[in-house]
Amino acid sequence: MRILIVEDDELTAQALVPILTHQNHVVEIAVNGETAWDLIKTFNYDLMLLDVAAPDVNGVSLCRRIRARGLHTPILLLTDHDSCHEKAIGLDAGADDYMVKPFDQEELVARVRALLRRGSISSQPVLEWGLLQLDPSSCEVTYNDQPLLLTPKEYALLELFLRNSRRVFSCGVILEHLWAYEETPGEEAVRTHIKGLRQKLKAAGAPGDLIETVYGIGYRLKALPSDENLHSTHNSEATAPSTQQRAIAQVNAVWYRFKERVQEQIAVLEQAAIALLRHELTPEQGQQARQDAHSLAGSLGTFGFPEASQLARQIEQYLQQESSLDHAQALQLRKWATDLRHQIERSPTLPFSNSHLKSNGQSPLSPSISQPTVVEAPPTHLLVKTVVPDIGYPPRLLIVDCDRTIETTLKAEATYWGLQVEVATDLIEAQKQVQQNPPDAVLLDPAITVSPASILSWVTELSQRTPPIPVIIFTWQDNLEERLEFARMGGRAYLTKSATPAQVFEVVTQVLHQADRTKTSILVVDDDLKLLALLRSLLKPWGLKVTTLADPTQFWDVLEATAPDLVLLDIEMPDISGTELCQVVRNAPRWSALPIVILTAHTDPDTVNQVFAAGADDFITKPIAGPDLVRRIMNRLERMRLLRSLDDPEQTLPHSEIYSSVLEDNL
């Protein structure tokens, strides 16, 4: 765990370091409040020890500033004065605990351990993953009851994985968690420690790939069989569709939504080929055919038709030289158009079927999957509400309450607020609904079950999802202890049932707006509606706010209105090209550093040079590979966040920790 000590007395600070590092924590020291504040804005800490008498900004003021920023990191105040009044001021400022100097080493370690437990995702004193166990209180690690002797860094690395068992960690993120800022080594150090940890686990009888590599991304714990997974009863792969599976369902839905349009575009190509044979092809007909061929070449491969995509590209190239085509070439064009239709008819669905993935051991959306596989059409429930309209959609609120009267009243009121309401009358039903079709927010009555622990665990689980699902507590109880407990578990608001329906939905709307503002925003500009819908479906499940635009002439107005964190531009569009829009953005001081990624079906040197000469940061070739798209966008966003934090710590992107770990949480 990463701990920040804010202490101007060097002797005290240096005395704390060995005590905490002996417990396998990474410790950083700030000698005054302003330095500490810069570190807090740049890095994530698991615990902070603040000296009340720190210079510049004292510990109490710094504590207030931390809480005002919305950070819930546990805080332990250190002071020389054993005054009840001073303790009260510190606790009221948002501190979690208080210790008077000089402090007993054993008591300090125990208080630190308690605060870390309180702020941890896991409520278990012993972290488990199958036969692997790690006891934070004794720093002991065993596999199948056989002890493992780990170095401090190996121990910290394993603890990081166990506390975030579903997350993928890149080398950069591991370095942030396990090394102090001033002593951060290169990524090779991470790989060395991973290798050493794997060897020791394997020697104890663990599988060699218990810590598996997600190529191009990082490392994570290998998923356990559902009957062996002791870590969670709610997240087993047998019952809960992952972010990847939801993305697969959405891509399927997009294909079925646009299949008829694809057939119409192929008909245009067939008609153009016939007209060319008869020497009757008009300029307008030729232009439309070129546009449709370009669109199909860019999108069909993404939907799982690589051969069809290649055929469309060949047709596009022929149509670009229509005036010089002879009769034989026109016949070839007609044959390709016919073959293109046969390809689509023979392959009714996508290559990304779950059965195909499981049978060959590959993960969903794997870049290595390229050949189409014929599978059954997806169930109807997967085709409903999976593709969000480009302009607005009703946010979904899940009400978890067994009171039918309240349910009826809130359902009637929801229509006036533009919300779609669904109801679950018990916790199991609510968990099932969230797994099948995650809502935008949850209104939860804790009395839905007699087990407070299961409610708190579920609230924590929802707050840790990507993207998080905000939870609003709705109860007859009104006491500080319960409010505090739910706030610590990640609850976003607390309402009593004495509130009117209008007051309830006012709070729901505020929470939804807050959640929406935390998302990283991406603007996608492409004249191909199929591709826009597909990109939205690929990106939205990863916690990204996606705005799509089909008319490039409206680009500037939409750019100013949405203020995106990244822009995706198609290189070939009517009226204005993607490279021209890129140049416009680079000429505006406000947007000169905005990350821009170009989408192109061409990879010839001239096109690549044109892309980078216009000021683009990267380009992605069509047909688009889902994993590659997500990985490159996330890497670009994280790189921009780090650059901004280094240039000006005040100008970091909003809630940057969300999008810096979105990909790691889900792949």
Image (tube, rainbow, N blue to C red):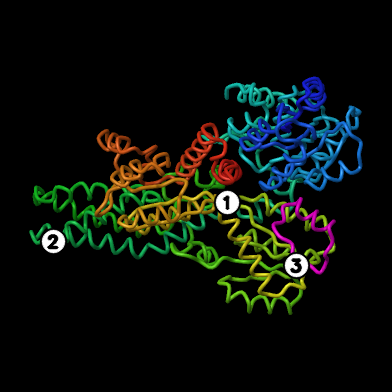
Front residue of 596/305: it is 596
Is 481 placed left or right of 157 in the picture? right
Question: Circle 3 sits on which residue?
Answer: 426
Q: Which amino acid does the dot numbered 1 rest on?
A: Thr
Secondary structure state at the residue bearing disc 3: loop
**What residue sits right under mark 2 in the picture?**
275
> For the point 90% across and 32% down, which residue is it?
107
Badges 3 and 2: C-beta atoms under 8 Å apart?
no
Spatial separation of the CA atoms under disc 1 and disc 3: 30 Å
Please say if 106 is above or below 530.
Answer: above
**Number of numbered markers:** 3
Q: Where is residue 307 drawn, in percent x and y?
A: 33, 48
x, y percent for residue 141: 80, 30
Disc 3 to disc 2, how far (Cα)? 64 Å
Question: How busy is the neighbourhood of tag 3: few (under 14 within 10 Å), some, or many (20 plus)?
Answer: some
Could you say which quadrant of the image residue 586 lies in?
top left
Q: How far from the left and from the top, in percent, is residue 299? A: 36, 52
- The residue that label 1 is drawn on is 518
Helix, strand, or loop for circle 1?
helix
Apparent side of residue 359 relative to residue 524 in the rendered image (left or right): right
In this picture, residue 89 sits left or right of residue 368? right
Mark earlier in primary sequence (1, 2) = 2
* Mark 1 vs mark 3: in front: 1
**Residue stretch in magenta:** 475-495
How dense is the environment of label 1, judged by Cα within 10 Å: few (below 14), some, or many (20 and up)? many
The kind of residue on which mark 2 rests is Ala
Mark 1–mark 2 Cα distance, whole angstroms, equals 53 Å
Residue at coordinates 42% horizontally, 39% vertically from top-left?
593
